[in-house]
Amino acid sequence: MNGWTGQFLRVNLTTKTYKKEPFSEEFARKWIGGRGFAAKILFDELAPGIDPLGPDNKFIVALGPIAGIPAPNTGKAVVAGKSPSTGGYGDGNLGTRVAEQLRKAGYDVLIVEGRAAAPTMLYIEDDKVEFLPAEAVWGKGTYETNDWIYAKYGKGVGVLNIGQAGENLIRYAVVRSLEGRAGGRTGMGAVMGSKLLKAVVVKGTRPIPQADPAGMKKVGYDDLREVNRIDKKTGWSIQSTNGVLAWCNEVAALPVRNFRKTHHPDAWKCDGERLNNARIATYGCPNCTMRCGITIRDEEGRESELDYENVGLLGPNLEIFDLPPIGSLNYMCDDYGVDTMSGGCVLSFYADAVDHGAAPGDLRFGDSAGFKKLLTSIALRQGEIGDLLAEGSLRAARKFGHGSVDYAMQVKGLEVAAYNCKFIPGMALAFGVSPIGAHHKESWVITFELKQSVRESYGPEKAKKVIELQRIRGGLFESIVACRFPWIENGWSLENYPKYFKLVSGLDWTLDDFWTVADRVYAMIKLFWLREYPGADRKQDYPPAVWFDPTNVDTEGPIAGKHLEYDKYDVLLQHYYDLRGYDRRGIPTRATLERLGLAEEGRAAERFGSLT
Ligand code: PTT
Ligand code: SF4
């Protein structure tokens, strides 16, 4: 089957067995790959209500038709499972050689089941699968683990690994790869840890089936050069993702002091220009000619890779503005395998709770040494507070009480990204309706609403834009599996993707065909959530309460006196549901499911909440 290897590799850690499973072309066309494959497999194979940290959960690595093929930014993989942080569908996307190596080994998807009896490293080389002891690195950080693996197999293999956070089942533990890549902030590192799976190592030697390999090779290499030329012209990778920090500060969208403030006079100290000045090296994902991984020296002299999310949430959000201490917190997150975004929000939530007398302790904003200590106690689950905060901000807030749930900065249990939506309704909606909990990856609508000067609006045009972006970002890029940055940051045309798709699969699709699959995948994930949270409630799609709080407004600056309004947000949410063909609870209607070819899945989910 051109475009896909046509096989899953299913591995069971309990029985130490594995099998190759063919999938049909119909399945491939219906779900494309990546998130599409993962959502369908998890819906079909997980019994509702299972413990995400128990042996019944599955850890999935899913690739798409262009993943690993030399072409712009295809060195990416989706990691997925039932999320320990939200209890719903969870996934993440990271740069890794696994994308190419797993496909060359002959598989589009790896499904890991069960639980090993002892710490294990899975080694996959074409038809061979080995269950190897990993005691030597159990308890070690991701850097040491990576080095240990490279020393055994060389640097060309694909590696996914976890640190102590994954082993200790921190609900927002990530999976790591390469020098500075991390993904699966919905707790996929903890899913690996719960299976005693320390690492996955993959080597493949076979060609990936393609309809027109010579044509794809020519177009792929030409386009890699062209993306590099455009990037040199735009200069995007000079500041990379952190180029957005100064803008967020200017438009009052920066998270400062657990999102209580939206801008700060010292923010310039950690902006993109300062980051570029402090740069000691640049890293990137495979098949990328616009590499965005900027590293600096942290306070301890270690090399730490900083993106905007890491800087925003471990910096201004904690009222820390100097890059070296931000780099230290970031390095610790990377080494322990803690998500920097949820980690940053959990640290800021705790300092805020202490400040408001809701939690015991004396930690103050700006105390970088105190935050480092707390981060260690979270990653190692030391002490009562470390152990509680390892559960995430929502669970901790429920325990602390005193109204602290209102300022736990999360949606559905997943902490928000570094965009302060105190008065940005469309971006607040994007967080609210993201299918994995608050994440900017699905719809980064903030630039549309602020640059088009429609900040005040709660109109249907914003819901429409959120859906348009979800189809591109959460649909196309997460299913075909490639990095979205060439398109977002350097204007690389979306029309290139049907072109690549045709060269690998032979199928002549338009972007509209991809949007249909994207809508199907979003509806599928909604049904997954319905089964886990029977009945459904539109309140699940609301952003944090503090953004609606009239006592929490800015007293000066561009949004002085402004806050989100409940009634208007609810109308905006309804626009979104109407445009998607969902009912008032946010569940796809029977007609929508039928249109998307999901009638059977709808019937399977119906006993958890009636369909309209
Ligand atoms: C992603 C999330 C992000 S999104 C960032 S910074 W960003 C944080 N990075 C972390 C990190 O680093 N270390 C760590 N311990 N935790 C981290 N958590 C955070 O994880 C990432 C880039 C970035 S940098 C972004 S926006 C884009 N994301 C893409 C995406 O989601 N899909 C896609 N098809 N292409 C993307 N391209 C860009 O990739 P999650 P990476 Mg990450 C160190 O996975 O769970 O989705 O969370 O993948 O390879 O590191 O590249 O300003
Ligand atoms: Fe990776 Fe950055 Fe390149 Fe995207 S732009 S593939 S995240 S290095």
Image (cartoon, helix red, strand yellow):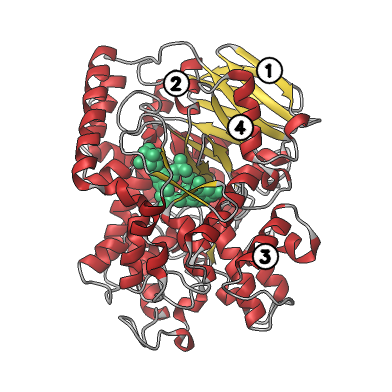
Report if residue 331 is visible in the image: yes
Residue furthest front as drawn: 301
The location of residue 558, given as percent across then percent down, is 30, 81
- Disc number lying in front (1 or 4): 4
> Would you identify the image quadrant in which residue 265 lies?
bottom left
Viewer-proximal residue among 323 and 386: 323
Which amino acid type corresponds to the residue marked 1 in the rendered image? Glu
Q: Is mark 1 in CB contact (under 8 Å) with mark 4?
A: no
Residue assigned mark 1: 130
Q: Quadrant of residue 451?
A: bottom left
Alpha-carbon span between mark 3 and mark 1? 38 Å
Crowd band around label 1 with a 10 angstrom C-alpha radius: few (<14), some (14–19), many (20+):
some
Query: In terms of sequence position, does the residue under pointer 2 or pointer 4 come before the other?
Result: 2
Point out residue 374 in the picture as x, y percentages from the top left corner. 69, 63
Which amino acid lies under the numbered mark 3 shown in the image of this protein? Arg
Using the numbered discs, state the Cα–Cα distance from disc 1 to disc 2 in whole angstroms.
27 Å
| Residue under pointer 4 | 146
Q: Tell me if mark 2 has few (under 14), some (14-19) or many (20+) residues whose alpha carbon lies within 10 angstroms of its own.
A: few
Disc 3 designates what residue?
395
Circle 3: element type: helix
Q: Position of residue 64 (x, y in %)?
A: 41, 30
Q: Quadrant of the N terminus?
A: top left
Q: Is residue 83 left or right of residue 586?
A: right
Could you say whether the residue bearing mark 1 is in a helix, strand or loop? strand
